[in-house]
Image (cartoon, coloured by chain):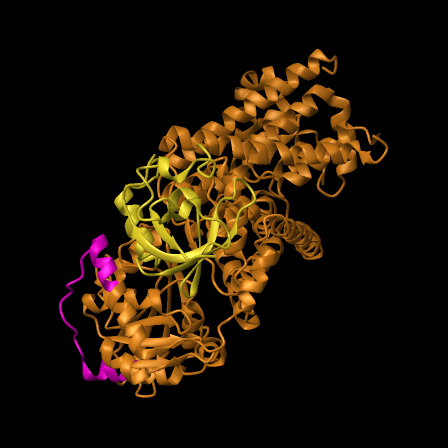
Amino acid sequence: MSEAAAPGARIALVGNPNSGKTALFNALTGSRQKVANYAGVTVERKEGVVVTPSGRTLSILDLPGTYSLRARSPDEVVTRDAVLGRLAGEAAPDVVVAVADATNLRLVLRLILELKAVGRPMVLALNMYDIAQRQGLRIDLDGLGRELGCPIVTTVATRKRGIDDLIAQVDAIAAAGALGHASQWREPSAGEIREAHREAQRILKATVRPAERPDTFTGKVDAVLLHPLAGLAILFVLLFVMFQAVFSWAKPAQDLIDAAFHALGVLIAGHLPSGLITSFLVDGLISGVGSVLVFLPQILVLFFFIILLEDFGYMARAAFLMDRIMGGAGLHGRAFIPLLSSFACAIPGIMATRVIDNKRDRLTTILVAPLMTCSARIPVYTLIISAFIPSRQVLGVLSLPGLVMFGLYAAGILSALGVSFVARRIFWRGAVEPFLMELPTYKLPDPANVARNVILRGRIFLTRAGTIILPIMIVVWFLSTFPGAPVGAVDPAINYSLAGRIGHFIQPVLQPIGFNWQMTVALIPGFAAREVAVAALGTVYAIGNADASPGMLATTLAHHWSIATGLSFLAWYVFAPQCASTFGVVKRETNSWFWPMVMLAYMTALAYAAAFATYRIACGFGLG
Amino acid sequence: MHDMLAEPIASRAGPARGGAVRLSAARPGDRGVIVEVGADAAGAGHGVAVDELQRRLLEFGFVEGAEIEVLHEGAIRRDPIAVRLDDMRVALRRRDAQDVWIQLDPR
């Protein structure tokens, strides 16, 4: 960017949730935005730049939505501290842009009164102004501006209306060098909140004539979508469709990515002399990148649905419908979406827990997210089921393998409910946070906004997960490769490697649950990602390319393992912490090693106990 | 946890105030005006102190004088509830609504 003629200015967008703040941010900055984390916390920091006609560079910060500066969640703490200039390494904004849903002014007026006390120069953007006009809502803009002592701009962010006007107003304030006054803000007491409400009410009465044609659409839709029975039925149908789409729409793209990386590996292996470097490129780097990318289609499809439903206003309704059902296990209604995402992969699921305001609710959700059957378990389940579960009909209509698969999913869900129930009692002595949530009016999602957010989520997944998964894949490659097999070795090379030695070392511990040394050796690379265990079993049983021909591996396993061992391995995989990337993400999201350790401990304990019980019971039935 | 709907309102933390009822006991279709937002919820058990809950309620617009109407309730134990609060819709659990007293309009 060229040298700006005028000194730059820092702008912060503040507003209630659902005020269209992020749409306004997108309209202002276009694609010139970057997403990072605030130092030390896992709150997303979205910043973008816009150059004004006078040549001033405005850097615009999209702060998390809030109803009050009295912060209650990590997101709201960031908003408060950013506005007050308390964030480490960040000065207070030069201009605050208060973003308001023009059709829902009462609560935001109280927030604006709080912002006034902070003393930064301010502009009020009355967003969704087209809807206000359609409803026949009359706002006396001059009067409101006088009452609040700040310029007002009307905007329609989704149509990019009023954006130039807003930029001009901000530019004018920056040009005037308005400094504002020192902050007089402090946490309001209950009495002061009431007083501010009265003041907001007075301003509202004086400057806004109520809507002549208020929105009745939301009420009518809610009568169906929030109906105790019909609403739940619709929710489950939606989930079913979403689930189907995550797996079926993503499948061709996943197969393509898989095949492309496989072909690339073959190509490189064919053109380079076999040796360590080739092995590193093919088995470490390329298969590492491939194992990250292969989840991208599912994550894009998943986030497409989530963002679509979120923008429509449905997600708050889903939380409402699920709150009591999940609440019995001590989970918050909003935990529903992260847990749903975890069926694709726990990593985006854990990242999605950011929608939960409360720390305890959020940590509980993070703890149980890996128990949801992620798609990386499916190759392992499919392999073992095809090896050990006879393809029989049960009760005439149900297939036995399908039934076992269903049982594995159910075991994951039920154990997640159980663990959250116990965790709540152990860690927070059963305290339940209040559940207060606005049900926004329904709005048609803006396709451009949905597309932009889906791409953004995909990018975040690639950078966050990629930077964790890739190094882990490389470490695992190292462990499985060094030291190499001695001359004249008969066993597969992995047997002589560090991974092999670790596998042999822990084998006595896993003996009681029916695991042989080949299995324990295969578990070590399986820590990189669950589905890697399939390839690793292929390696230890010296079947090349086990991914491509699982049938042969299944036959070999059926020959070498007892049924009890096969079932025990399935039970192990329901619970086992076989995914180092998940721990990396949990460490990052919780900012501590404590929670990943708790997760590792409880998952290992559950896996061992479940596999032990399964193995012993199966042996008791003579399947050993 | 007990079912607060099964219990007569008067037995909880003193008598109903001047004919007002707790929002936690209201049913869909009930409408009226908020007359008091207290800070003495019986049986606590909230993850936050009662005066913190009171401030959160106030910030969400549960404030004396606001018009309120119960719109929907959940399938299990009729919880949570969705209310129209002046011009916005809010969902909350009945246990968090105990301190909101409403003067019902005659039906």
Residue A561 vs residue A75: left or right? Answer: right
User: Chain B shown in which color?
Assistant: yellow
Magenta-drawn segment: A170-196
The vertical placement of A316 against A611, above or below, is: below
Residue A470 vs residue A623: left or right? Answer: left
Q: Nearer the viewer, residue A467 or A399?
A: A399
The vertical placement of B57 against A535, above or below, is: below
Instruction: Judge whether residue A482 is colored magenta.
Output: no
Residue A511 vs residue B18: left or right? Answer: right
Kindly tell me whether residue B54 is visible in this rendering: yes
- The image shows residue A28 at horizontal and vertical percentages of 40, 76
Q: Quadrant of residue B12?
A: top left
Q: Identify the residue at horizontal 32%, vertical 83% (top origin).
A: A141
- The image shows residue A494 at horizontal and vertical percentages of 60, 31
Q: Quadrant of residue A392?
A: top right
- The image shows residue B50 at horizontal and vertical percentages of 28, 42
Q: Identify the residue at horizontal 23%, vertical 57% (top origin).
A: A88
Residue A396 vs residue A97: left or right? Answer: right
Instruction: Judge whether residue A174 is colored magenta.
Output: yes
User: Chain A shown in which color?
Assistant: orange
Locate the C terminus of chain A by quadrant. Answer: top right
- The image shows residue B25 at horizontal and vertical percentages of 43, 44
Locate the N terminus of chain A by quadrant. Answer: bottom left
Kindly tell me whether residue A553 is visible in this rendering: no
Q: Nearer the viewer, residue A157 or A300?
A: A157
Q: Identify the residue at horizontal 80%, vertical 34% (top origin).
A: A399
Q: Identify the residue at horizontal 30%, vertical 88% (top origin).
A: A54
